[in-house]
Amino acid sequence: MRVLVVEDETTLREQLLAQLRQQGYAVDTAADGHEGLFAATEYPCDVGIIDLGLPGLSGIELIRRLRAQGRDFPILILTARGRWQDKVEGLEAGADDYLVKPFHIEELLARLNALVRRTKGWAQPVLRCGPLQLDTRTQQVSVDDALVELTAFEYKALEYLMLHAGQVLSKTALSEHLYDEDVDNDSNVIEVFIGRLRRKLDPQQSLRPIETLRGRGYRFTLNCHDVTDSGPGAAV
Amino acid sequence: MTMSLNRRLLLAASIVLLAFFGITGLVLERAYRHSAEQAVFDRLQGQVIALIAALEQGDDGRIYLANALAETRFFTAGSGLYGQVGRNDGRDVWHSPSLTVQELAVAPLLRGQHFFGQDRLAPDTPVFVFSLGTSWEENTSFERSYTFTVAEHRQAFDDQLAAYRRLLWGWLAAVALGLLLVQGSILRWGLAPLRRVATELVEIKAGHQQGLNYDYPRELRGLTDNLNALLEAQRCQLRRYREALGNLAHSLKTPLALLQGNAESTQQDASALVQEQVERMAQIIDYQLQRAAAAGQTALTAPVAVATLAGQVLAALDKVYYDKGVVADCLIDVGLEVQLDRQDMMEMLGNLLDNAYKYGRRQVVVTAGLCEHHAGENSGSVFECCVEDDGPGIEASQWRHVLQRGARAGLAQVSGQGIGLAVVQDIVVAYGGQMTLGVSRWRGARVCVHLPLMNTPA
């Protein structure tokens, strides 16, 4: 899961970077609006965290431009002033949620999770695909109600696969969305990693949740279902 | 710098006045001159006719004075009136005794023809000349033509014209001057209220007075009333900022003291305490800043379309509370506009609706409208806005407490979720309105704000 952080305050930016990495996110950072615009066009973001009070290109203007370019990844705005005027303006510009500074990192992570999940069409915080169950709140994964121990990175990768269930994901796409650094296309990092995930989730090889499509990539095959009907919402 | 109003008006009036009097003077002078010339013409014509009556043609064809002439000036040398009669064949000329120096140069005229014009007898003797052609019958078959000429010195005419001119221009100048003076004093009088505004503003700037107190004329009252409202709003704003800063300083000291004490004792569980106090400080800052930012009532606020604003807030909250699937109804007349500060309105709606989304289960409704209210002096319309939800509601025993928390702005009591209502309460107080709590149609919470609207001066 690749997240873009646009925040001009160095300390906060570094803090966010460290904590998001710890959570298994791939992170790009930018210190101002123009840098943010560049980063967003350069890297495939899954979610953005944008401070409203940016120097140069303001946060709101940045969001407007991103949306105008057709970039529709969910955006969480950070605002120092808790004014509703700012919040409403930011959300109108195309952001999806807001957080008033100062905030708890847990709160930020929960909002980030919820944003990604719901833009992929999941109304509930628990993703269920066959016997596989992934709780985005507790970050726990279980198969047939038996907990599976995963690292933060493995968890994020599985979440990414489940959120894109049924879609073919190329090796390049996977490496772009999961890794911070460029992964050499010829290297077998992804193959090794998928193999490890398969062994952990499906030691008996009876479930086969991740299918390899030769030359094309991977696909999460289990049949996923939202627990309730998709929520009534104004999401467009 | 642009020209002062006074100077502009005075300059424009002066130009108009001068042009008017100048043209009037010129026209009058022309008309007078024309009629004076006409008078000369008539007079000289009369003299010629008198000459014709007085002169006779002798048998030898010579002209002689047969009857007495009433006009004695013909007989006084240099009198200024001269007569001359010449035969058109140039054979004989009669001069009046007054014409001593030389003959008048006159072109012979045929019977019935006449000439009127100016000439000079000598370089320093300009005259008016009138000639008339006549003929006398001789032996019934033969006619002889004569030209009768009378000349009059221009001196009298010029003197008369000069006297008239002096009189005319003198009077015109005097009247123009008088009018200008009157104009100037009218301007001074008319613009006096503006000067008064300027002096009062200087007084306000110097801190000697609070607003514009003078009873200004109707045309200026809109300006001065708004200025007063603006000044008052500014003062309120300043007061709120000062209070907020004072409160901030005061209330931040408690958590700081706690932190300091903790740092000194270095006992267990420091991070939890730091966390807790930092959070508290953040809330205090938020609360005080939002409170201070409330604009309050001014006459200069542009009207706000309430339904549009509520729609914006609802759309924002729908995004934020997407997972909850709240159904919100906005029962506000699309045309409803009120003169309240946009940001204050946004803050109120934002906080009220945020609470409703947060504590409600699935239903939220917002209503707003104007109602007339009459209470002696303060009759006017009141803006009423209510937000209802289907949550657990606020217990009636808590109402007083919740309302007071905002009103007193006691910072110790500001905690977590109550901050929204406290902010709304502060804005409502800034507008001199009130907030009421109640039970909604779904037995949840119902929060209403009532804000009196300032009557805009007509």
Image (cartoon, coloured by chain):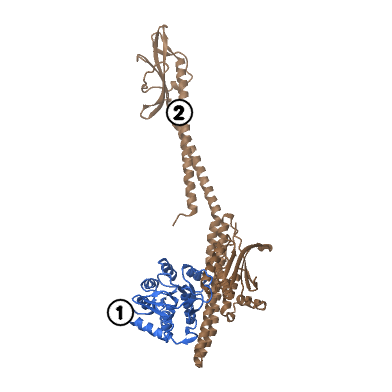
Residue placed under numbered mark 2 in the picture: B37
Q: Residue at x 48, y 52 (%)?
A: B7
Viewport quadrant of the N terminus of chain A: bottom left
Q: Residue at x 53, y 87 (%)?
A: B258
Residue placed under numbered mark 1 in the picture: A186
Q: Amino acid at mark 2?
A: Glu
Can the viewer see residue B208 in this picture?
no
Number of numbered labels in the structure image: 2
Q: Is residue B14 left or right of residue B455?
A: left
Q: What letter labels the chain drawn in blue?
A: A
Label 2, secondary structure: give it: helix
Residue placed most toward the observer, B208 or B65: B208
Residue placed most toward the observer, B262 or B112: B262
Q: Position of residue B121 (x, y in %)?
A: 37, 26
Q: Residue at x 45, y 25 (%)?
A: B41
Q: Residue furthest right?
A: B376
Q: Amino acid at mark 1?
A: Asp
Chain B: colour as depicted: brown
